[in-house]
Image (tube, helix red, strand yellow):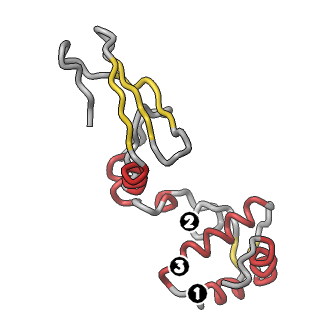
Amino acid sequence: MKFLCVDCDRQMLFEERQLPGDGTLAAAFRCPQCGRAVGLLTNPMETQLVASLGVKIGGTTIDPQPLETVRGMVTTGRDEAFAEAAGDGGRGTGVVWSVDAQERLARVPNFVRGMVKKIYADYAKDRCIAEITPAVMDTARSELGLEGM
């Protein structure tokens, strides 16, 4: 999606993006030729929809990556799909799972297993824990307040 200046018929350039904190999103675009500006304001539901679709509003801070569009379509909801292997089965988290921890994780219902695995992997990564074991899982559950789950 592009914004065009009606007077100049030129593509407007991204100028600013704000997240006021009330669930809305504001973005400003300006015509490079005449200076005309246009603003975009989304309500909380529109903001959530845009975020869930993985749409980027505004300019990017890095150069386009190879096959960026394809990666975006393939990895919707799965940021780790193209992560480099780091001794963790290609999940990009840098942690190793012990056999006992893998067996315990296998007992988690499939529809939440990925989220549970990410919680434990993030916990271990934040604390520089190289291997996730059942003991680490127990400690994480306690520290993160997940004991009743």
Q: Earlier in the sequence, mark 2 or mark 3?
A: 2
Residue at x-position 30% and y-position 22% = 12
- Quadrant including the N terminus: top left
Q: Residues within 10 Å of mark 1 (few under 14, many from 20)?
A: few
Q: Is residue 112 left or right of residue 13?
A: right
Q: Is residue 144 above or below residue 69?
A: below
Q: Tell me residue 16's x, y (percent).
A: 46, 27
Q: Tell me residue 11's x, y (percent).
A: 26, 22
On the question of residue 126 being in view, the answer is yes
**Which kind of residue does numbered mark 2 sit on?**
Gly
On the question of residue 71 being in view, the answer is no
Marks 1, 2: nearer the viewer: 1
Q: Secondary structure at mark 3?
A: helix
- Residue 112's disc is 3
**Which kind of residue does numbered mark 3 sit on?**
Val
Q: Earlier in the sequence, mark 1 or mark 2?
A: 2
Which residue is labeled 1 in the image? 108
Q: Is residue 82 above or below residue 38?
A: below
Q: Secondary structure at mark 1?
A: loop
Which residue is labeled 2 in the image? 90
